Amino acid sequence: MTKTSRFVALVALALAACSRPGAGPSSSPSPLLGAEDPGRPLPSPVPEIVARVNGQPVRLQQILPMAKVLLDRLEATERNSRAPEMLRTALGQYVDRELLLQEALARGIQVDARAVDWAYDQMRREHLAEQAWNRFLARQGMDPRSLRTELRARQMVATLLEQEAAGGQGGPEEVKAALLARLRARARIELLL
């Protein structure tokens, strides 16, 4: 198995794990959120477009699955009071991911379609019954097409981070943090939440 295939397999497992309680993205706020109180009330109504990253809109529907994972990790009694914070945390994580994806696209990083198909097939094998597969996709806020798109995006980001790590110093988290700091410094980010 190639390095890329191994990575895609890990991404597929990580995506599958995001649907399980206690798993998924970290609930620590993104540095992008700054010093503002992430728990402040949400605007009413919550806008359909919650941010723009270098002119590209980020829609509420794109961050809701991540926010749900974060909310599911909380005690039931905390969920309502911390919903604005978890939505903003998910937004920060999504914006960071979008910055990395845009950089991968700008660098012309290509993905192996067979590796994406393989990762998709591995996830599908874990949910053989059509009803179980549809429930899994719904928990992720995706359909089969958007899942493939997400797997492709994650592979592109992983390849970008591998390239950065090969030319840099430090561990994977330090390399990612340094790259994100550079990308944030030159990006146009408009948060609307």
Image: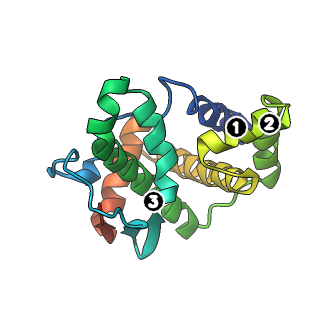
The disc label shown at residue 60, or none: 3
Q: Position of residue 88 (x, y in %)?
A: 32, 50
In this rendering, is residue 103 above or below 4? below
**Amino acid at the residue labelled 3:** Leu
Mark 3 crowdedness (10 Å alpha carbons): few <14, some 14-19, many ≥20 = some
Residue 119: name its quadrant. top right
The Cα atoms of the two marked residues, 2 and 1, are separated by: 6 Å
Q: In the figure, is residue 164 to the left or right of 120?
A: left
Report which residue position mark 1 lands on. 135
Q: Nearer the viewer, residue 34 or 81?
A: 81
How many labels were placed on the picture?
A: 3
Q: Position of residue 138 (x, y in %)?
A: 65, 44
**Amino acid at the residue labelled 2:** Gln
Q: Are marks 2 and 1 in contact (CB under 8 Å)?
A: yes
- Tag 1, which secondary structure? helix
Residue 135: name its quadrant. top right
- Comes first in the chain, label 1 or label 3: 3
